[in-house]
Amino acid sequence: MPAGTSLPDRPPFVLRARLLTPLTGGGTGYLRDGALAVDATGRIEAVTDWEAWARAATTAGRRSDAEAMLSAVVDLRPLVVLPGLVDLHVHLPQLPNAGVGAGLDLLTWLGRYIFPLEAEFDAATAERVAPAAFRAMAAAGTTTAMMYGAVFEPSLDIAFRAAETHGIRAIIGKVMMDRLTYDDRLPADRILELSLRQSADLCSRWNGRDDGRLQYAFTPRFAVSCTADMLRESAALARQTGAYWQTHLSEDVHEIREVARLFPDAVDYVDVYDRAGGLGPRTVLAHAIHLSDREVARIAETDTALAHCPASNLFLASGAMPLARYLAAGIRVGLGSDVAAGPELSLFANMRAGAYVMNGLRVLEGDDAPGPLVPSEWLRIGTLDGARALGLDERIGSLEVGKEADLIVIDPRMVAPIPGIDSDDPDEIVSRLAFRPHPAMVRGAWVRGRRLDGPPGTEALDG
Ligand SMILES: [Zn+2]
């Protein structure tokens, strides 16, 4: 990389780099010397071999433009450009607790660490935490995040405003709880009504802003802290507004027992949400670890999406989600960091955790268990499949012409076992990023070609 190379802040621009991406039609695209052109609107205009792009740029008839085009090129070799990562499940107010509390069961952990923290997430705390959280997400390589806020309406406006300014692609929802809640500011008999109204107001203010970069998700926390009325009414609002609906499902055995006690008429946990009208293509359910065949079939049938949170599932000793079984059933699955039940925002670290879980299941279940995913399949789950889970795969999730330029650039030298070890095999490149992630390896991130604050840039690498 030439000395003094700095990353472009705004489109249009052209990156010369190694380009690695899942492809919509299947398989992985890799160009060892590629050109990625982003037009003035922030869309990907070309993804091609460098020689071919440079030749086209200098052909007769375009000669007048050629010099300008070539001067707009930023040469990032040997760095690798990937599509930005899609985090389907992360809790904004919980970030300050990340990395603390491993090994507890979910309900104990919520009571001891999380509810007291979320109860403090007022407007002033949100002003402090939200911008820093978005910078940290971008530094981890996340360009799209589906988030839970806390219960307090003003903190959600602040979070949305911070996302609007930062540039990250964000789906956020006010957490709704009308029992077992930490919100003692509202009269108990009005929590349901007020929570629905505040959520609907937030949705009307923010859903679809900036041409869909910001979206709203109605967010009943989970069946333990929501009555059947809350689940049903929030799902109805999501349907009416076209917003998302997100909640937790089947995370650990104590929680499942509690849900069975609270909803004695439901056949199983999935049925609790099914009866509320909560299943469907605009719904993302996090965890979904301990599902019966009936529940898996019902999720597939309703085209409901799942957020796989493997690091969180191990951190809290919740269980091992059988990913291969869900993929075989045709369920849309993406990755979730689930900070702070997950210890870090990096989805690369979650690819590693997910791969270890699959290996662990093979040890326990024997040779009948499905084989592990290859690394490029993990990259697909963290990018294009996450976009598909959100219904955004026509806009983002891969480096393909016509898509919005949500990109990250990574320095693979930071994950080399010893200096000088490198590879031009896409599976080997992704394998080292997933199994040896370095906290500073993501050097830049863009949404629609606009650079996000957070990653350290490339200047420090020069010379
Ligand atoms: Zn969660």
Image (spheres, grey):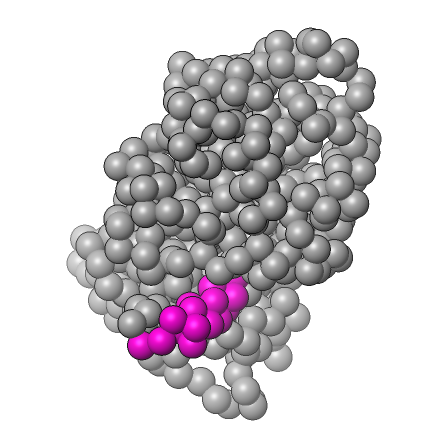
Viewer-proximal residue, 219 or 362?
Answer: 362
Q: Picture coordinates of residue 192 (x, y %)?
A: 62, 14
Question: Is residue 437 in the magenta section?
Answer: no
Q: Is residue 298 left or right of residue 219?
A: left
Residue 181 occupies which quadrant of the picture? top right
Quadrant holding the C terminus = bottom right
Asked whether residue 359 is drawn in magenta, I would say yes
Is residue 80 shown above or below 273? below
Q: Position of residue 54 (x, y in %)?
A: 28, 65
Q: Residue at position x 28%, y 65% from top?
A: 28
Q: Looking at this view, is 460 or 404 the one in front?
A: 404
* Dominant SS type (magenta): helix
Residue in the image at 39% along x and 28% along y: 274
Please give the range of residues in magenta. Answer: 350-367
* Left or right: 370 in relation to 448: left
Across and down, in percent, residue 331 comes to 31, 46
> Residue 195: image x %, image y %?
63, 16
| Left or right side of 6 for 271 | left
